[in-house]
Amino acid sequence: MPLQTLSKQAGTAFSIVMGVPRDDLQITEGKLKTYEDSSESGEYLNRKFCPTCGSPIMTDSGLIPDLLFIKAGTLDDASSLKPDIQIWGAHQIPLGQLQIDAPKVDGNPPAK
């Protein structure tokens, strides 16, 4: 994801997301709107957001179609989350460094 796209869509130098298996996620209230975007590789990248307030909720990526990426800030309690990888390190904005013990990769996470 280009630096400009990340900083614009996140509104900050980084975005904390949690990968959730697509089949395990159910939205039980309301409907999300979608902004259709594309990744650096040309795959679809659908950004889902609240149609009322505009808050970003999740990303649906054609590069990893089995997962949906939930914005951690939307969770009622994110205190138990522990980052296990930092992605897109090659596009990191030098405004601040996350002080976490997790490997950093320059682009997308490696396929498992």
Image (cartoon, grey):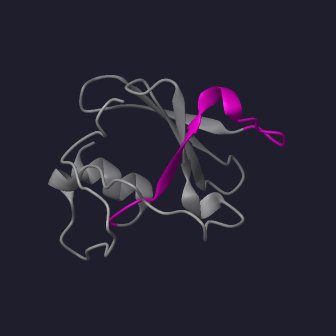
Q: Residue 1 versus residue 102: which sits nearer the camera?
A: 102
Asked if the stretch drawn in magenta spans residue 20, the answer is: yes
Which residue: 56% across, 44% down? 58
How far across and down, in percent of the image, does residue 88 sit?
A: 25, 49
Q: Residue at x 18, y 71 (%)?
A: 94
Establish if 44 lies above or below 8.
above
Which image quadrant: the C terminus? top left
Residue 29, given in percent of the width and then of the height, sits at: 84, 43
> Could you tell whether 10 is left or right of 58 in the image?
left
Q: Vertical placement of 82 versus 19: above or below?
A: below
Residues drawn in magenta: 13-31
| Residue 51 shown in magenta | no
Using the image, determine if residue 33 lies above or below residue 90: above
Left or right relative to 79: residue 104: left
> Which residue is at 36% across, 55% downward?
8
> Where residue 43 appears, x then y in whole percent?
34, 22
Viewer-side residue, 17 vs 81: 81
